[in-house]
Amino acid sequence: MKVAVLSGGVGGARFVQGLVDVVEPSDVTVVGNVGDDLEVLGLHVSPDLDSILYALAGLNDVRRGWGRADETWRVLETVRSLGGETWFQLGDLDLGLHLVRTQALRAGQPLSRITLRLARALGIEPRLLPATDDRLHTWIRTPSGEFPFQEWFVARGHRDEVDAVRFEGEESATAAPGVLEAIADADLILLAPSNPYVSIGPILAVGAIRQALAARRVPAVAVSPLIGGRAVKGPADRMLARLAGGTSPAHVAGAYSGLIDALVVDEADAHDLEGLGEVRPIVTRTLMTDLEARRRLAEAALGAVPA
Ligand code: GDP
Ligand code: CA
């Protein structure tokens, strides 16, 4: 069974870890968000792609939730002592990847090709593709002004309420090579338990990807990132409350209107399934505490495909 999964960073990476444990990894294509990408200290950083790379390679720091395990910070200390830019933390091990990627981008290679090469070098079997090779930048409008995504998320600790999300470059961004093919060839399309607005939203902002999902002939299943109406981590619940008017399964499904056939929701939200319309709820435990929990969650989502 071929699976295409749209994914943000940490929540998405955890889910994909379970997924590749229950389906043949080489049958999985992960389409990752690049709306968060930024330049730090002259280097191109793709935080969401890297979370997936590190998780699938088993190199991720489980406790911190981002970056690499056994990381050290000597470069950052030097940068700080020299009065350089330190608001976005890059560890010594992590920096190696950003150096390789940035050099390849400067040499004119597309991000998709570089990402495939990095995945191969890390021994990762599933295919990981950025949604687009084109410039696509997420901007967050708040009562205090509009900020580039990472300035709002990291530098301001996503403390400002969000009035709107905008994707600079969306009019002209095209799907990266392989993305539309993966969606067309898939027997199942999955939307990971990622932030609908700032992780899955930028992927769907690529017109051709949204159209491919809308025109699908196979089931599409989203996994809710909320448990009991609350985000496990991050601002997804606050954003849904303010932008969609609530945090029920129907509000999550509303972010994917016309694009999904089923929504995996947590048992803690099972009392609140009103308003889902055509979207079928799949109720299970969705907290991805360990690999077993991730695997069970992936199996629940796969259950949407008739055997
Ligand atoms: P980011 O790009 O690193 O912010 O990561 P994502 O957007 O992929 O994931 C963030 C979302 O993952 C948050 O909204 C969390 O609520 C959700 N999330 C994290 N862990 C879990 C989990 O164990 N279960 C569920 N259902 N959602 C989770
Ligand atoms: Ca992200």
Image (cartoon, grey):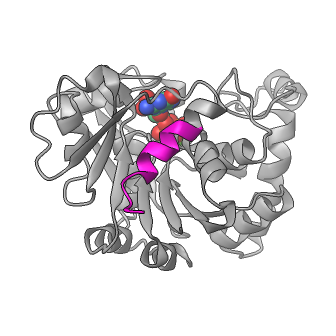
Camera-side residue of 250 and 295 = 295
Question: Relative to 298, is 261 on the left or the right?
Answer: left
Camera-side residue: 71 or 27? 27
Residue 70 vertical placement versus 39 (above, below): above
Q: Is residue 269 visible?
A: yes
x then y, percent, for residue 247: 23, 27
Relative to residue 249, is residue 205 drawn left or right?
Answer: right
Q: Residue at x 50, y 46 (%)?
A: 299
Q: Is residue 53 shown left or right of residue 209?
A: right
Q: Quadrant of residue 80?
A: top right
Relative vertical location of residue 304 with respect to residue 61 in this rendering, above or below: below
Q: Give whichever of 256, 23 is nearer the camera.
A: 23
Q: Main secondary structure of the magenta part?
A: helix
Is residue 47 among the parts visible in the rendering?
no
Image position of 254 with respect to 155: above or below: below
User: Residue at 56% across / 31% down in the picture?
Assistant: 293
Q: Is residue 242 left or right of residue 110?
A: left
Taking the spot 67% from the left edge, 60% from the top edge, the residue there is 25
Q: Position of residue 7 (x, y in %)?
A: 50, 50
**Spot occupied by residue 84 in the image (x, y as percentages of width and height):** 75, 31
Residue at point 26%, 56% (across, down)? 261
Residue 63 among those drawn in magenta: no
Residue bounds of the magenta highlight: 295-307
In the image, residue 129 lies at what x, y percent? 60, 65
Residues 125 and 145: in front is: 125
The image quarter containing residue 72 is: top right
Quarter occupied by the C terminus: bottom left
Q: Is residue 300 magenta?
A: yes
